[in-house]
Image (cartoon, coloured by chain):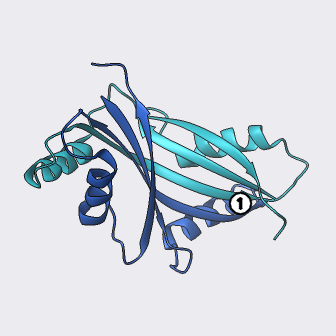
Chain colours: A cyan, B blue
């Protein structure tokens, strides 16, 4: 069994209104040392062994469903999980 | 300048309907090897040096604003960023 951690973030060139809103809130709480906030998605997938290549499958899942490749980038990490 | 990466995830005991929906979609795309999907938030904060202790400030920000501590857990990592 594998655990795949996927990090989806907006591309640098894309405006992040949600991040700006959070930064504004942090500033109103006197955390003025915060100079930028970017918000993305964090997914944890548990994947069983299969005859399909894991990297190929994860890339396909990310590009077909989990991310909007026009405005988002993704990266992932694979961890071994003790069999459940 | 520091970059703080915050990972916000639902507690294990909390149902994740969004994760279940994504898993259903992955199964309908024949990725049946996926046995669980958990979705959370991933935040990147850029924080300038200040007289306030960084860990204290980050924990406060997380617990006051960035997470709902009743149903969410968080962890964070701190990276040094070349001065901008």
Residue A30 on image: x %, y %:
10, 50
Classify B69 as above or below A8: below
- A55 left or right of B2? right
- B68 left or right of A77? left
The residue that appears at 26% across and 44% down in the rendered structure is: A19
The residue that appears at 79% across and 44% down in the rendered structure is: A54
Classify B12 as above or below A57: below
- Viewport quadrant of the N terminus of chain B: top left
What residue would you read off at disc 1? A46
Residue B46 on image: x %, y %:
30, 35
The residue that appears at 34% across and 33% down in the rendered structure is: B2
Of B42 and A33, which appears nearest the observer? Answer: A33
Q: Chain of mark 1?
A: A
Residue A35 on image: x %, y %:
21, 35
Of A19 and B67, which appears nearest the observer? Answer: B67
- Pointer 1 local density, CA inside 10 Å: few below 14, some 14–19, many at least 20: many
Q: Is residue A71 visible?
A: no
Quarter occupied by residue B54: top left
Q: Is residue B13 visible?
A: yes
Residue B68 on image: x %, y %:
33, 70
């Amino acid at each position: 069994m594998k655990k795949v951690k996927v990090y989806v973030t907006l591309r640098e060139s894309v405006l992040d209104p949600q991040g700006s809103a959070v930064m504004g809130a942090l500033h109103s709480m006197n955390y003025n040392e915060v100079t930028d906030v970017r918000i993305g998605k964090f997914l944890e997938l548990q994947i069983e062994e299969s005859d399909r290549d894991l990297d190929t499958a994860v890339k396909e899942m990310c590009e077909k469903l989990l991310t909007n490749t026009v405005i988002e980038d993704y990266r992932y990490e694979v961890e071994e999980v003790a069999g459940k």
